[in-house]
Amino acid sequence: MKTVFVLFLFVSCAVLAQGTDIALDAAQIGRLGIRHQAPVASATVAAAAWPARVVASADAEWVVTAPAGGVVVRLPVTEGQRVAANTVVAELRSADVPALGAMLAQARAQAALARSNSERDRTLHAEGLIAERRMRESDSAATQADAALGALQSRMRLMGVSAADAAAGRVTVRATAAATVLERMVLPGQRVDEADALLRLADASQLMLELNLPVAQAQDVREGEVLVVEGSGEQARVSQLGWGASDATQTVRIRARLQGAGALRPGQWVKARRSEAAAHAWRVPSAAISHSAGKTWVFARTAAGYRAVEVRLLSQSAGQASVSGALDATDEVVVAGVAALKAVWLGHGAE
């Protein structure tokens, strides 16, 4: 143990003397058990497949709610069904709606009377029979009556209730856009309150892949990168990289927006991979890969010793890894003694 510590101090001093290069002589290389191997150039990279779940985009999913309290009498759609815009998706019976219809009729009558009074007073004022103040009071009353009527009309329009429906206590709920029914959240005969959730819908043309990758793999994924779904060939572009890792699984959640959903469906499990033409792509043994400060490195042989080369990990299996970085065919990378060399490298303050 003492011998190893002395060797480490000696090597560290040699490194410090050489700045960012890791300067080692043949004897030191032998003691650290370092061996090298030339990387193999690769024009394309076939990455390992990752499990992914198809989910609806966050901005393409919504909930249909009850416009008024009442009893659900009909749900003419089923889970997984695609519906067009304006399709009836639910029907309720509500004891509150007839009163709303009566309020609307009363508001119309009051607005008509207020407008009539305003017009009359304007005529009387023009003839000099009443004061201007009385005319302005009539105009104000007409404006307020019109505003109250407009508010009631807007409320009924948002509820999707016509005058005839209001009289019958019937509320018809329609899809606001073309969508797929993800979930029926109530049953016929169930009593609901205003704003209670009835259905969950999603735009099936806006889907995403959701992946949970180990931290070591996730740190090499970049926003904007393209993933290919195995089998179907559908493409998805990475749009969200999780900030933190799950405590239980130590994985990072990544989402990629599908560019045309094709035959994929929400909830479906698929495999996605990176398969790309990469500039400066190389195949090296997995043992050559090292991680530090959220980056991936290999150690390349130099005339004086070694240098740490930052690379992008494109794929990795039990024995082989594909990387992209500033290597060339004359370089040799360290494939044994990597941990000892990394300790020396970090010992002189490299990040």
Image: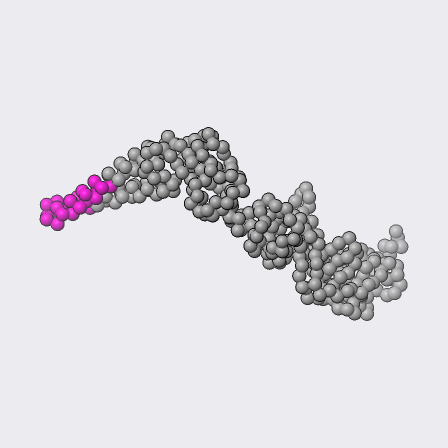
The residue at the point 88 percent across, 51 percent down is 1
Magenta highlight on residue 133: yes
Location of residue 296 by image quarter: bottom right
- Magenta stretch, main secondary structure, is helix
Front position in the image: 192 or 182: 182
Q: Residue visible at 57% across and 46% down?
A: 266
User: Which quadrant of the structure image shows residue 348?
Assistant: bottom right
Using residue 99 as the reference point, say whether residue 121 is left or right of it. left
Picture coordinates of residue 160, whole percent (x, y): 38, 41
Span highlighted in magenta in the image: 110-138
Residue 157: % across, % down: 36, 42
Task: Quadrant for the C terminus, please.
Answer: bottom right
Q: Residue at x 65, y 53 (%)?
A: 231
Question: 309 or 316, which is in the foreground?
Answer: 316
Regarding residue 141, the answer to whether it shows in the image is no
**How has the structure been colored for display?**
one colour
